[in-house]
């Protein structure tokens, strides 16, 4: 059986079945890691850095769609207190991982 159509020389094709299997599976595993695992690791690292950088008066929104201003962050308890309304001083406590992103206000150029 010739495997030259997928780039394996006839010398390797005459080897044992384990060698052939490894030569075929290794590139597939690398592609899987490169396109699926690596981007997920980068996203987790970016999110961890974002949560660590939260500070008082940052405007954030939660995974539930609630927008608020950070009143207090407790990294040890993994909790965050958001101020939702200034007029009646409404504050709500969330788990730190409920924060989806920091809201960046667009700068108005005058």
Image: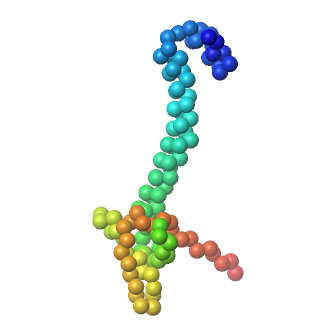
Which residue, as the protein is rendered here, is positioned at the far bottom? 87
Q: Is residue 25 left or right of residue 4?
A: left
Up the image or down, 99 lies above or below 85; here it is above
Q: Residue 23: percent from the left, percent from the top?
A: 54, 21
Q: Residue 12: percent from the left, percent from the top?
A: 57, 12
Foreground residue, 71 or 4? 4
**Which quadrant holds residue 49?**
bottom left
Quadrant the C terminus occupies:
bottom right
- Residue 41 visible within the image: yes
Residue at x 50%, y 66% (from the top left corner): 101
Q: Residue 43: percent from the left, percent from the top?
A: 50, 52
**Which quadrant holds residue 83?**
bottom left
Residue at x 47%, y 58% (from the top left corner): 47
- Residue 71 visible within the image: no
Up the image or down, 14 lies above or below 91; here it is above
Q: Is residue 30 left or right of residue 51?
A: right
Which residue, as the protein is rendered here, is positioned at the far right? 110
Foreground residue, 11 or 76? 11
Q: Residue 31: percent from the left, percent from the top?
A: 56, 35
Up the image or down, 45 lies above or below 61; here it is above
Residue at x 49%, y 55% (from the top left corner): 46
Quadrant the N terminus occupies:
top right
């Amino acid at each position: 059986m010739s495997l030259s159509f997928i780039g394996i020389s006839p010398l390797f094709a005459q080897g044992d079945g384990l060698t052939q299997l490894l030569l075929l599976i290794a590139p597939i595993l690398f592609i899987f890691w490169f396109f699926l695992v690596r981007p997920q690791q980068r996203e987790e690292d970016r999110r961890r850095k974002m949560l660590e950088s939260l500070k008082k008066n940052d405007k954030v929104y939660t995974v539930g769609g609630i927008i608020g201003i950070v009143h207090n962050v407790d990294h040890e308890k993994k909790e965050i207190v958001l101020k939702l309304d200034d007029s009646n001083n409404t504050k709500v406590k969330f788990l730190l991982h409920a924060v989806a992103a920091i809201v960046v206000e667009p700068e108005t150029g005058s």
